[in-house]
Image (tube, rainbow, N blue to C red):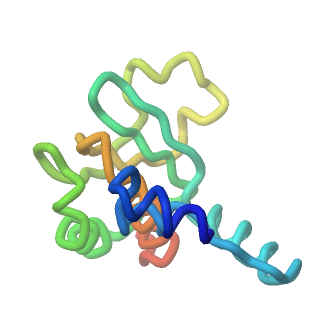
Amino acid sequence: MKFLTQHLYKIGFISEDDFYFFKIIHDVKAAVKEITGFYRIYHSARWVGGKLVIRIARALSAASVAELNNKFADVLRRGSIVQSKALPQERNEPEILALPRLVLTPHRRSFGRFRQLIDAINRAECA
């Protein structure tokens, strides 16, 4: 951590938001809680062209999607976060076609903000 803050951050190779991309945990129970919480609703993600498709275990409420759009407008290159079914390009993953999706067109930077988005998805109210 010292190297990250004193070298990479100091000279601008990483941003403050990048520190949200990971967590340092020193306790096994806390690590298990972190991992299971990470996959509470979030399942996986993939890029389809310029769109990020976030696969989720359960659909979110309309209010939750609206809240995500308000809190994470800064990560969007254009458009909004929309709840969707699988995109046609995802047919090659039939085992997860039924999962609901959140689709967005983000900037490809500030990946720490993506971690914050995943955390917000996992705290969101389901439909």
Farthest residue, direction left: 78
Q: Residue at x 47, y 23 (%)?
A: 90
Q: Residue at x 49, y 60 (%)?
A: 7
Where the N terminus falls, by quadrant?
Answer: bottom right
Image coordinates of residue 9 in percent, x first then y, are 41, 62
Q: Quadrant of residue 127?
A: bottom left
Image coordinates of residue 2 in percent, x first then y, are 60, 71
Q: Is residue 71 left or right of residue 111?
A: left
Q: In this view, does 68 lie to the left or right of 101?
A: left
User: Height in image: 64 above or below 3?
Assistant: below
Farthest residue, direction right: 28
Q: Which residue is drawn at 25% across and 44% down?
A: 106
Residue nearer the viewer, 96 or 104: 104
Q: Which residue is drawn at 88% across and 78% down?
A: 28
Residue nearer the viewer, 26 or 115: 26
Residue nearer the viewer, 10 or 62: 10
Please state the total of marks drawn on the protein image. 0
Q: In which quarter of the image is residue 64?
A: bottom left
Image coordinates of residue 120 in percent, x first then y, are 42, 72
User: Height in image: 27 above or below 54?
Assistant: below
User: Height in image: 38 above or below 101?
Assistant: below
